Image: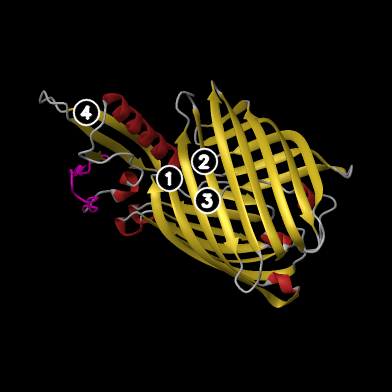
Amino acid sequence: MRILSGDAEPVVWRSGEPWPARPSGFPFAPSSVLSYATLSPGDSMSEAELERRTWTWGRELDKSGRFSRSSVLVADLGDGSDRRGIVVEAETGAVPIFGGGAAYASVALPLLDGRRTTLGIQGGPNLGSIAYRDEALGDASLVLDGGIAYANDLLETGGFSGNRLSGSIGIGPRIGPVSDFIVRARAGTPLGGAAGEYGRFVAVEGALELGGFSLSGIEGLDGALIALGDAYPGSASRKVEAESNLQLELGSATISLAAGAGIAYGALDPSELFDLRSGAVFLRGPEPYPDPVGEFSLARIDVDCTALKLPVASWFPLSLGPFAFCEAAFVSLDADASPSPSGAAGAGLRLKLGPPVGLTIDIGYAFDDRGVGALVVSVLSQNLLTGEDLR
């Protein structure tokens, strides 16, 4: 297996060897492309399977946004045997990625020092954070991430009012080219004498992040799944949620189906509850629940169609299309009370600004089961460390 980049001397990965080290003068660490690999030297498989795996590898490199150009090709060795060679060509395109949300801006620096790492920074009047993620720690199948953030609820609704300092650190194994399992410790505390006992939390989180899977037999369909579980030591509070996203390419259009479900119990602050995509309209809408809840379960489905791709520039993808969502919940404001049902639905137009901006803007109308309706404007930033929408 050979890795090529520009005029640099090729890097070779042979059967039975670990990932090769980064040679002097090579523009990136070989691990930054090999960590996306769906095969290894010496693997035995059919021609059809080899073709499928190399195609998947090339697709994941392209989707990563870390390279300005990349390809994975199968080469005939010309020796009359059934052995094949793999040639990976890549050129770095590690330009800053910009994004943002309500009253803040984001920037991420990917492929730091030629590795598969990202440094993300966010800043604004209601948020300041710095986070780091290494997806091939020490050229091993490990992911390390961590960060620290200052935030207030200037533009949020919920029971917590004031400033908060929070941080997290996590580590876990990669279980696929774009899949991993991470265990994180998270903590937060109020600052400046902020009111509310629920502003302080300590949590242990397990996150299973599966990406890049496709359903055989359905061309152009792939997706991702994220499952999370939080435990809050010292209390009886727990939270479990799962999100999935399927994308189907039909010609120039892309149809996305996002679905999520979660359940939480114990006296959690609403800011520690779910944000399935831009969900929980009854938490963030015109009449939000102001107090911590005893039990909360939520299911949400969000469908959008990227119908129109606007020709602004090749490096600035911009698309527009309709979206619709519906969500249902069972909420108990008191741990001793039976949960009562709630629901919401809405539709509108969705504007997507792809990398290097990574921003989704929704403008539509939403209403809930109480008959309360309103024009909803939602700004959703992409997580610049993982490429997923921010939770």
In the picture of the structure, the residue carrying the numbered disc 2 is 224
Total numbered badges shown on the rendered structure? 4
Label 1: few (<14), some (14–19) or many (≥20) C-alpha neighbours in 10 Å: many
Q: Name the element at disc 4.
A: strand
Label 3: few (<14), some (14–19) or many (≥20) C-alpha neighbours in 10 Å: many
Display coloring: secondary structure
Using residue 8 as the reference point, say whether residue 109 is left or right of it: right
Image quadrant of residue 232?
bottom right
Residue at 66 percent across and 68 percent down: it is 236
Q: Amino acid at mark 2?
A: Ala
- The image position of residue 292, as x and y in percent, is 76, 64
In terms of sequence position, does the residue under pointer 3 or pointer 4 come before the other?
Answer: 4
In magenta segment, residue 149: no
Q: For residue 178, which numbered disc appears in the image?
A: 1
Q: CA distance from mark 3 to mark 1?
A: 15 Å
Q: CA distance from mark 1 to mark 2?
A: 9 Å
In the picture of the structure, the residue carrying the numbered disc 4 is 75
Q: Nearer the viewer, mark 3 or mark 2?
A: 2
- The image position of residue 212, as x and y in percent, is 46, 39
- The image position of residue 53, as x and y in percent, is 34, 33
- The image position of residue 77, as x and y in percent, is 15, 28
In magenta segment, residue 12: yes
Q: CA distance from mark 1 to mark 4?
A: 25 Å
In terms of sequence position, does the residue under pointer 1 or pointer 4 come before the other?
Answer: 4
